[in-house]
Image: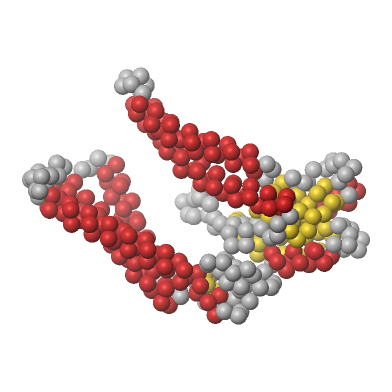
Amino acid sequence: MRNPERWRNAAIALFLAGPAIAVAAFALPEGSIHEDARGAMFAIGMMCTLFAGVTALVLHQDVKRQRRLARGEGLFARWRIAAADWQAFVALDKERNTRGDRLRNEFSPRAEVSAQGVEIAVGKDAVEIDGNLFSLPLHGAPEVTRAQFDESRIRISVIEFDLTYPGDGISDEGTPKGPRQSLLRFPVPVGAQREAQAIVTHFGRLGPQEPTFFHGRGDGSDPEDLATCWKCGFQTHRFTSRCERCGATMQTKRWARRAGWLLVVIGLGLSLGMCWLLAMMLPMLLHPGEEINGSRFTGSPGMASFVILILGGVLAFGLLSLGYGIFQVVTGRRSWPVVRAMLAIVGGFYLIAMVIRAGWL
């Protein structure tokens, strides 16, 4: 991405404009605009707040990576590719893109460059090529599934990264889209073999990694780093989100235990919150229209039943999250039946929302 800071600032502007648009939808005098337009304004404001806010956070990470490269933090190499070598790379890249046996390079090199050539900077989690930033987080998307240094004595040498992006959206057939594969290719100047090998070792995760909250060194020194495939049971200590045998997701014991603690906190909070709400509202919901402790539920008995159902469903989801979190903390693994049960509860909430939206109550 070229100039992520500009795009981040634009996303921040939309994020700040979102609440103003949503509030304006109700602040405008009655009759000044059509009610459908008022609803559309509110929806647009909420969408701007949600999606622009998330986009701004993601782009801010790109800005920080670009600034770290500029400061030289975590830098593996900073190369100046001569104009003649750049032209040789452009020709090689075009040939490999059209050959068809490899994925197309997601970086499109410009054909004409100045006499000073092109600068390339490679850091621990990003590559900047001719001013274009490519974020490559070690534990995020896109994931580098293959790193190769293609050294040549005849043509210009290159580094190639095979990238995997998570599935995004739904296909035309109504099924979730699977992971998307891509490739990043960039040139290596003569005499930079040692730096290139260090880059391939780092991004190919061929050596020990820096431990984080969710991930360890990945070199086999800690049994908590052992990752297991959901589908075929393949196991490895090397960090990878996709099984090299069947392509299904992998999960380490460390990740399962840490995620389990988060589920315990979330599940406990939901469970206690719903228990408090049910204790406060259940007498009124069981006797709609009657005043109890100075308050009453004014909706219909059917609506009261749906409110009880929703609160009970959230309570069940919280208790299931709490139990599943404890299971992951103790065992360090996942459970498909519990995941299916949680998805079923979420699906039930969706059906309830559709019933209410259809006006059946």
Please give left or right for residue 346 compared with residue 190 in the image.
Answer: left
Residue at 50% x, 43% y is 53
Please give left or right for residue 255 compared with residue 347 in the image.
Answer: right
Residue at 18% x, 46% y is 303
Q: Could you tell me residue 339's position as x and y percent?
A: 39, 66
The quarter of the rendered structure image containing the N terminus is: top right
* Front-most of residues 337 and 147: 147
* Front-most of residues 110 and 98: 110
Q: Could you tell me residue 151's position as x and y percent?
A: 84, 64
Please give left or right for residue 317 compared with residue 260 in the image.
Answer: left
Q: Which residue reaches farthest left? A: 290
The quarter of the rendered structure image containing the C terminus is: top left
Residue at 14% x, 41% y is 298
Q: Could you tell me residue 276's position as x and y percent?
A: 22, 57
Q: Is residue 105 above or below residue 10?
A: below
Coloration mode: secondary structure
Q: Is residue 243 visible?
A: no
Q: Which residue reaches farthest top? A: 32
Examine the image and state in which quarter residue 244 appears: bottom right
Q: Is residue 322 above or below residue 69?
A: below
